[in-house]
Amino acid sequence: MTLKQEVEKRRTFAVIAHPDAGKTTLTEKLLLFGGAIHIAGAVKSNKIKKSATSDFMEIERQRGISVSTSVMAFEYQNKKINILDTPGHEDFAEDTYRTLTAVDSVIIVIDGAKGVETQTRRLMEVCRMRNTPVIVFVNKLDREAKDPFDLLDEIESELTIKVIPLSWPIGAGSSFKGVYNRFETKLQLFRSVNKQQLTDDILEITDLDSPEAKKAIGESANEQLREDLELIETVYPEFQQQEYSAGKLAPVFFGSAVNNFGVRELLNCFIQIAPHPQKSPTDVREIDPFEPKLTGFVFKIHANLDPNHRNRIAFLKICSGVFERNKPYLHVASGKQMKFSSPNTFLADKKSVVDESFPGDIVGLYDAGNFKIGDTLTEGEILNFKGIPSFSPELFRYIENADPMKSKQLAKGIDQLTDEGVAQLFTLKINGRKIIGCVGMLQFDVIQYRLEHEYGAKCKYEPANLHKACWFKSDDKTQLDDFMMRKYNNIASDKYGRNVFLADSAYSLQMAKDKFDKIQFYFTSEF
Ligand code: G4P
């Protein structure tokens, strides 16, 4: 196959959701329909259970297992599908945000009873930063759910995206009768099926006027469905591929993942409309996936699979060309040539060494500590991919050395853990005190635990009453200098030496914005 055919064959995406909406279940069902697994449970068993919310030891244990579900690849209708897994636990949201920098599209799962939730909103903001194409799956229709028109309004206004229902539910909960598939113009009747295995006993009716259709869902539901469909035709626009690809229009599907219902329709539509790997911006030029030379970037690092060796797996997203085993590539950050004797790819829940990978694929590279998030590999060209920012953390603590004999180990540990993206490190300009910024509380425990167990270092935390870290810039040097001077107590450097304003409250941030109106403040490190 040519490189062009390989690129066009690939669909790399992530399933994202507010916890509990059904992301794991849907992912599993996609694997099941894709023939990658034959019985559900493989992904589920790797999931960090809700009961473990405060048990980071459990999370440590799971971390080892979950490397195998980081990428789930399978072939379906001559397409190579790569599903990138995202952590279910809210405290690891930043991992999810970063994974979104490596996908070409997403499927957002929404609980039909709960509608759009906090995490759905946040994840959508990240998608919007890159205009990622989005398909929405409204799940749990077998339970009482909100009115579908209300749900569509909610999605449209809360996620600020136009929607178009490509399937339509007939009832919900105890009166759920099925969905009408507008994409394939078929009526599919619901039956609660064997949840673990694939069954193909879904009744399909193509003619809504047929007595069979009326009998199957009843006269009144049939009438209601026709009215709904008429309304949809007048209210919602036609599906436009271009608008979907530009991230402006989200097709919406309804179903019940646990009952395997609506999943195949979703997958079939996804295969047809989801984009193959697209161009990626760098600081020098745009990279086209069809270029013959390899480029790629690290979007995730999975550390310490064996506590005795500090080895890690860096996940490289291939953006152009062909990745070959044992071929030397330039690691742009260090200027060194690197080659990899056992790059891994992932097939469902198995990983294996591969000789060649193509744009859209993810390869796992064994790494002894050279890589950090965002690092680029090329065949010699010096460039760095854009769109892999750090996100402003919301929880802060001073970190202090609790064992003066181990200060070197502590520095090294903090350096490597922040390279991995576990947390961010800020150093206050005024006194050099170090502050760790995280997205979730649990990460503080994870850092402390890992510093001790992997680096032999001890740390302690002290509360830091801070609200947000913002990167900033301005063309007005006088105002910038004035701001830096007045706010000097709250200015820190991030790991890469960029200035950051650590606002101690939403109020003080607003005050700073009002007073220093020529300064732009940013919640991500890339602007
Ligand atoms: P998440 O990854 O988004 O956090 O959600 P997950 O798939 O784990 O699903 C959360 C819960 O919702 C699970 O129940 C799952 O079985 C249930 N669920 C998923 N899809 C549907 C659906 O279509 N209908 C209904 N009624 N429930 C659904 P749980 O009790 O937390 O776990 P389990 O013991 O059932 O595995």
Image: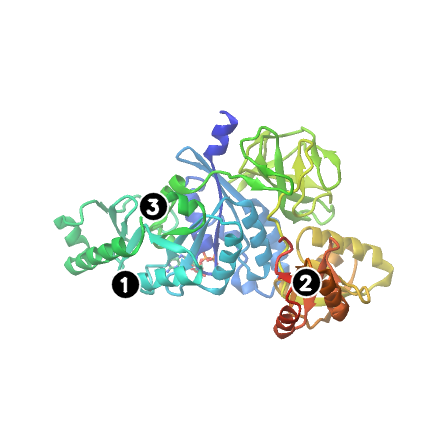
Residue 443: quadrant of the picture: bottom right
**Is 129 displayed left or right of 405 in the figure?**
left
Foreground of the two, 164 or 281: 281
Label 3 vs label 2, nearer the camera: 2
Other residues around mark 3 within 10 Å, as few (<14) / some (14–19) / many (≥20): some
Label 3 vs label 2: CA separation?
A: 42 Å
What amino acid type is highlighted by mark number 1? Ser
Residue 344 x, y percent position in the rendering = 60, 37
**Is 406 displayed left or right of 150 in the figure?**
right
Label 1 vs label 2: CA separation?
A: 46 Å
- Of label 1 and label 3, which has the lower sequence position? 1
Residue, x 40% and y 47% (percent of image)? 243
Disc 2, SS: strand
Is 441 situated above or below 186?
A: below
Residue 513 x, y percent position in the rendering = 63, 68
Disc 3, SS: helix
Q: Do residues under tags 1 and 2 come within 8 Å of each other at their CB atoms?
A: no
Label 1 vs label 3, nearer the camera: 3
Disc 1, SS: helix
What amino acid type is highlighted by mark number 3? Glu
Is 486 situated above or below 247?
A: below
The residue wearing badge 3 is 265
**Is 349 displayed left or right of 414 in the figure?**
left
Q: Residue furthest bottom?
A: 507
- Of label 3 and label 2, which has the lower sequence position? 3
* Ligand 1 under 8 Å from disc 2 Cβ: no
- Of label 1 and label 2, which has the lower sequence position? 1
Residue 174's disc number: 1
Residue 286: quadrant of the picture: top right
The residue wearing badge 2 is 437
